[in-house]
Amino acid sequence: MVEFAAILLPMLTLLYGIIVYSIVFVAQQAVAYAAESGADAVVAVAPDFADFAGEAERQARMRVDDVLGFLPGSGATTSVSVLPPLDSASRQVIVNVNYPFPSGLSVAGILPVPEFLRAQGLVNIQLL
């Protein structure tokens, strides 16, 4: 009984840590995939479109919201920014995704969890 009591707390702490970091890992992978998918969605916008930056950001936002729909609070709080090409020679578009990670997983600060999960997706646009 004494041995069980001595081992119980460290084992529960280890189990809790595995669960929390698994959730963080899955959320980070989802944010990275959302950034890549948002960059892929920008390809559908014609580079010579009048409001390329606005339309690219709208397309990326829709795709990111679709991918991150299963995460709590993702639609209203996730920030998506699209950095369009600076000039006609530069055809690389960058999509940044910042997801505020829920802070309720860290009980009394035992395990540190990140405040934000960030990812970046980029795509090269080529004119045919």
Image: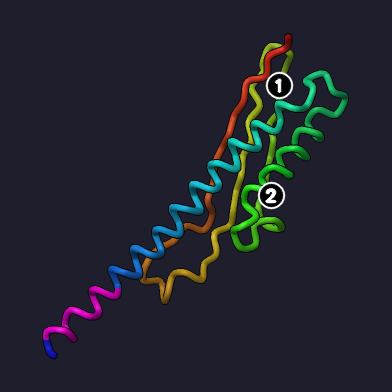
The N terminus, quarter of image: bottom left
Q: Position of residue 68 (x, y in %)?
A: 62, 51
Q: Which residue is mark 2?
A: 65
Side (left or right) of 92 relative to 106? right
Q: CA distance from mark 1 to mark 2?
A: 26 Å
Disc with the residue nearer the chain's start (1 vs 2): 2
Residue 7 drawn at (x, y percent) = 18, 79
Q: Residue at x 45, y 59 (%)?
A: 23
- Majority secondary structure of the magenta segment? helix
Looking at the image, which residue is at 54% across and 54% down?
116
Q: Position of residue 43 (x, y in %)?
A: 70, 26
Q: Secondary structure at mark 2?
A: helix
Q: Which residues are magenta?
A: 3-12
- Tell me which amino acid carries mark 1: Leu
- Identify the residue under disc 1: 86
Q: Secondary structure at mark 1?
A: loop
- Measuring 56% from the left and 37% from the top, which residue is drawn there? 120
Left or right: residue 54 versus residue 100 is: right
Above or below: residue 1 compared with residue 109: below
Q: Residue 15: which quarter of the image?
A: bottom left
Q: Quadrant of residue 63?
A: top right
Q: Can residue 9 be found in the magenta stretch?
A: yes
Q: Position of residue 90 (x, y in %)?
A: 66, 16
Looking at numbered disc 2 in the image, what kind of residue is underneath it?
Answer: Asp
